[in-house]
Image (spheres, rainbow, N blue to C red):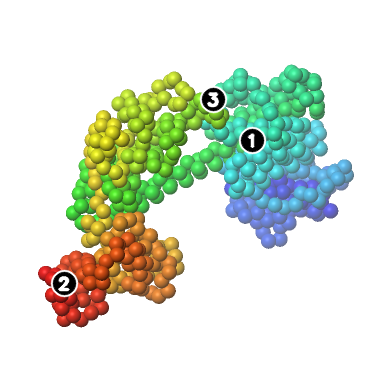
Amino acid sequence: MILAELMVQTKDGKSRRVPIDREFFTVGRGKHSSFRLDDKWISDEHCSIRLDGAGFVLDDRNSKNGTLLNGAPVKTSELKWGDVVQIGQTSLVFIEHSEADDEPGVLIEEEHALPEGAKTETIEMIRKLRMTDDPHRLRDELGLLHNIVAALGERNELPIVLETLLNLILEATKATRGKIILMEEERPDELIVERPTGATIHVDGRVLDDVVRGGEAVLLKRSPESSSAGREYTAICSPIAARSKVVGVIYLDTDGSTEDFSLKDLELGRTISSIIGMNVQNAREYRAIKREYEELRKSISGRFYMVGESPAMQEVFRMIEKIAPTDAGVLITGESGTGKELVARALHSQSRRKEGPLVAINCAAIPQSLLESELFGYEKGAFTGAYKTKIGKFEDGAGGTVFLDEIGDMDLDSQAKLLRVLEQKTVSRIGGTKQISVDIRIVASTNKDLAESVKNGTFREDLFFRLNVVHIFMPPLRDRRKDIPLLVGRFLNDLAANSRKKLKITADAMEVLSSYPWPGNVRELKNSIERAFVLSSGTEILPSDFAFLQATRAADRKPTSLAQAERHHILSVLSATNGNKDQTAKILGIARSTLYDKLKQYNIE
């Protein structure tokens, strides 16, 4: 039989409910205690709770650090509903059962983690609740509090957590309708949760503004016109705050179908909002940290993969180091797969803007009809489907770098607007009239010949000159074959770090890679290494693991005679070995004398 319960709040913010199922119940660190706590400030048998006649009594068991009851040291004292016992760094809230309690066994021991900062709010709420003269109200509200703590302890996405919380609040209070609105810089954000689902709950804009700016919960009287019951009713609007900053509001009303809210309900709403606030703030900070981590990882890995000892790559590195600290516009050109985006990331990570965002947008991947709204954003109501204001990529990149990949595919209208951004450093959202200042650096890339596009009339000459302040050319892989072994080594190391096997590549296999023309450049090389790594069953990567490259190469060639094909292949291998005939013969699988015969036959010097 459960006689009473303890709601336990530990130093790490975890909450649990523990049943008192005997007339003499001890709490401590020792193995013989009825309830054991891992708290170094608590004695082996720290305190006890005993049934004495019609009530319960708290006794300190000569503990080393003492026992506090509602903030005051005690040796022996009567326990009442909602009393807060403090031992060590743990708080115990006493909840006595009565004969009227019809579900005494529902509260079993379970543990949940409170968000950082919410523990203080929870204990403060309990202290206020214990002043009530209604023990059943106390039990219900403590139960609600426990369920809220449980929901916040779940590792779900924020929208799911907020939906769960709103459902819990509506089930446990007089409220019949509710709405949670999150704010971003004192503006309503996109995350709005309403219950019941499909309900249209209007929150007066002036009330919302007062609550957000004032940071205080309000108890409202609502007119009969907005009630389904046709009578005046009450509502609560409380700020969701964390660290003195309002991050949202929670709105609850009775819709006239239940009794009105009281000041005690207002206090409950205020405390619940504070607890939710810490969870919202933590979720947002975690999201921001995760985003920064991804940017950092991409930035570091970007420079990490830009390995190269060839003169062409050394020139690229020299240019990056020289122009990264400036705000000069940069145009990066080169074939697809050469690593143009890695250059943009390296420029950003070594610039004074590295603490700001790097916003990348592929102009070729977005339909031209949508590109303008992506870059410039739009105001609410600007066109059909514009249900809310959208910030464009240029505004997103404020204080940082905007990377326009494949800019050669941008249409002329968008080019004209981009030119104004470069000249005036302002943007105007679609449907808006306000000019918004943006502090950004533009870095662009293309695999097209923009000078030729200017002649053809498909690219603006003035925009070309604006973008091409500094030009960086990324060489194709076939022109930097010296770097292939370095790249292969890097890719194999990365694959080994993320798997349980480690493979080496044979010299013959490396020769195959060095002789291949790599039309897809570094991207194709990386994919080929990954394919060979995954499919290889031995401890080494062999030439046969790259047979698919020869098949691809053969499919790309025009039909030719066997003699022409043989001559072409011998020339390719000789080129890859820098004219070394011993290595060429070994790769071809023929004797050195046979190779000399072939060279003579095909008139190869």
Q: Is residue 189 left or right of residue 590?
A: right
Q: Looking at the picture, how far across and down is residue 9, in whole percent?
A: 65, 46
Tell me which amino acid carries mark 2: Tyr
| Depicted 189 relative to depicted 234: above or below | below
Kind of residue at badge 3 = Gly
Q: Which residue is mark 3?
A: 381
Asked if 426 appears above or below 96 in the picture, the reply is above
* Residue 409 image position (x, y, % from top left): 35, 39
Q: Residues within 10 Å of mark 3 (few under 14, many from 20)?
A: some
Are the residues tagged 2 and 1 within 8 Å (C-beta)? no
Disc 3 versus disc 1: nearer the observer: 3
Q: Earlier in the sequence, mark 3 or mark 1?
A: 1
Residue at the image position 52 percent from the left and 39 percent from the top: 284
The residue singled out by tag 2 in the image is 602
Label 2 sits on a secondary structure element that is loop
Q: CA distance from mark 2 to mark 1?
A: 77 Å
Q: Which residue is located at x 40 percent, y 45 percent? A: 295
Residue 403 seen in this snapshot: no
Quarter assignment of residue 478: bottom left
- Front residue of 356/12: it is 356
Judged by depth in the image, the label closer to the viewer, 2 or 1, is 2
Element assignment for label 3: loop
User: Which disc, if any, is residue 123?
Assistant: none
Select label 2 or label 3 by which is in front: 2
Residue type pointed to by label 1: Val
Crowd tier of the residue under label 1, counting other residues whose Cα lies within 10 Å: few below 14, some 14–19, many 20 or above: some
In the orientation shown, which residue stands out farthest toward the right?
A: 99
**Residue bearing mark 1:** 193
